[in-house]
Image (cartoon, grey):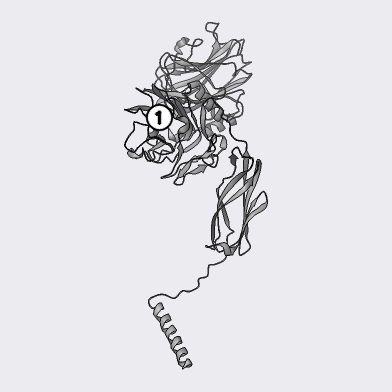
Amino acid sequence: MKLIKNIFFVAAAAFLAVSCNQGIDPISAVDPGPDASSPVVTFKSPTNGYEIKNGELVSSLNIDFEVTDDIELGNISVKFDGTDIKTYKSADYKDYRRLIDTLVHGNVTMGDHTLSIVAADLAGKTTTQTITISKVPPYSPKYDGEVFYMPFEGDYTEMITFKSATKVGSPGFADDGLQNTKAYKGATDSYLTFPIDAFKNDEFTVGLWVKLNASPDRSGILTVGASADSRNEGFRLFREGGAAEQRIKLNVGMGSGESWNDGDVINPKIGDWVHVAFTVTATENTIYINGTPVRTSAMSSPISWAGCSDLIIASGGTTFSYWDHKSDLSKYDDMRIFNRALSAEEIQAVINDDSPYVPKYAGEIFYMPFEENAKDKVSMVSADVVGAPGYNTGKKGKAYAGAPDSYLTFPTAGLKGDEYSAAFWMKINSTPDRAGILTVGDASKTESRNEGFRLFREGSAKEQRIKMNVGTGAGESWNDGGILVPATAGWVHVAITISQSKNTIYFNGEEIRSSNMSGFSWANCETLVIGSGGDTFSYWSHKSDLSLIDELRMFNKALSTAEVKAIYDAEK
């Protein structure tokens, strides 16, 4: 009887096996191929160079990482300063080709540290990925009234309160922030939120650095609101435009109404960091771009904070995503908020601290990019304005736009030397038919050309000759330069070099003409004139130039031909 039962069970099992496989292809082993690649290790957080800043002597560190292999992972070790803090074996993995994990290391002391992951595969190939992190003393506010500072150095921590912003979506970090640090990098449907208790005042200032991504063509930048259908509370800083021009705008809620500020435009194609700031008082709001106030709008009553609790960073968020003011894919850095309205001088001081200009070329002592102002970025001194020159689309960003009876003056104290060079881009307007371009002379003498130099143009609508005259002290040297055709020349890179024995004019990196001379004199030359013959060379009708001038640089040496060519190649 027992034998019969066993036969029955075997037959039933065989029947079920056949039934289950009906209509299904049998599973076959597949050769995965040779193990060709080493494991790949990726640190998601922290990033290389990350700094922990808080008031604790010892801190914890969240470590978020991923390891993958083409065939199968073996052992993985996480090391802090060379010591294992966790080891994984192949039996620990749900996916034998991939490990994603987050762990906490709770003994990070002051100073620099290394964090390493050593990953092996079953074929014996090993990958080691190492980053450095630091624990540094906590941040102390640098400026009067500073209540918020977020540097985006690999995390979203506000450094005064040590609170972290709440992350929505998957924003990230870029490696090309100010001074080659990290920066916030926007992503689709992503932004940060942070409580606003620290700056709920009638007066406040917000400033941040922005490297614009014009796609999408509009977005929120900073948003505080109470509801999705009202702009009568909080504020909205946002951008709108196209690939060539983005306008920065501001809307402020006043409880029973709103104030609109149409700000000004930024050219995203420049690819530079731009400082954007705005101030709010009980009576007005003002937008600043690179330290220059670009527009002020009146307010009939102070800002209303009713129902407002959070600041949205890099999006219109839940209260201002309409009109497509959604997430910004731009990069942000060094964001600060103040509980008072800063002056223009105070905003400029913050800019200078955050991003001092570092000369790009040997001997460079002056750089004026004409981005809506006439400030030398080396000395941070602004030129004095005579008349009403303006700014227009330049070779890069904006450019100086000449006007009748208008020019700039700048002190020569930091420019004088035995040798001198200048380089700039120029787009010639042949009306009037002659003008001064760069002029330095002795203002105490009438029609003296024995001191300083005069770069100027003469000609007609058909052709313009760029010339130079240099004072040697006892006499003068003339250089007849070369001809540009205004109708076809477009933007031309013009450079001049002056030594004690020779002066040279260059167009687009190529030498046009040199003139020998004996000496170079700065005697009694106190002022450089940009865009005119000015007080010392307006005779022979060398008056104001209506041309465009951009990216003006000066040097304390006579550049070589190779150096002039290198500058042209780098700037073209």
In the picture provided, is 298 more to the left or to the right than 524? left
Q: For the view shown, which residue lies furthest in the bottom direction?
A: 1
Q: Is 375 located above or below residue 31 in the figure? A: above
Q: Position of residue 158 (x, y in %)?
A: 52, 37
Residue 62 image position (x, y, % from top left) = 57, 48
How many C-alpha atoms fall within 10 Å of the one at disc 1: few (<14), some, or many (≥20)? some
The answer, for residue 496, to whether it is visible in the render is: no
11 or 478, which lies in front? 11
Left or right position of 327 against 418 = left
Give the vertical position of 432 relative to 393 (above or below). above
Toward the right, the furthest residue is: 82
Measured as percent of width and height from the top left, residue 406 is found at: 43, 15
Residues 267 and 39: in front is 39
In the displayed structure, 32 sits above or below 532; it is: below
What residue sits 38% from the left and 78% below the top? 22
Residue at screen point 63% across, 51% down: 116
Q: How many marks?
A: 1
Check disc 1 and report the residue beneath it: 265
Observer able to see residue 286: yes
Camera-nearest residue between 192 and 23: 192
Helix, strand or loop at disc 1? Answer: strand
Using the rendered view, name the quadrant where residue 123 is placed: bottom right
Identity, as a three-letter code, of the amino acid under mark 1:
Val
Residue 407 position in % (x across, y down)? 46, 16
Left or right: where does residue 70 sit relative to residue 518?
left
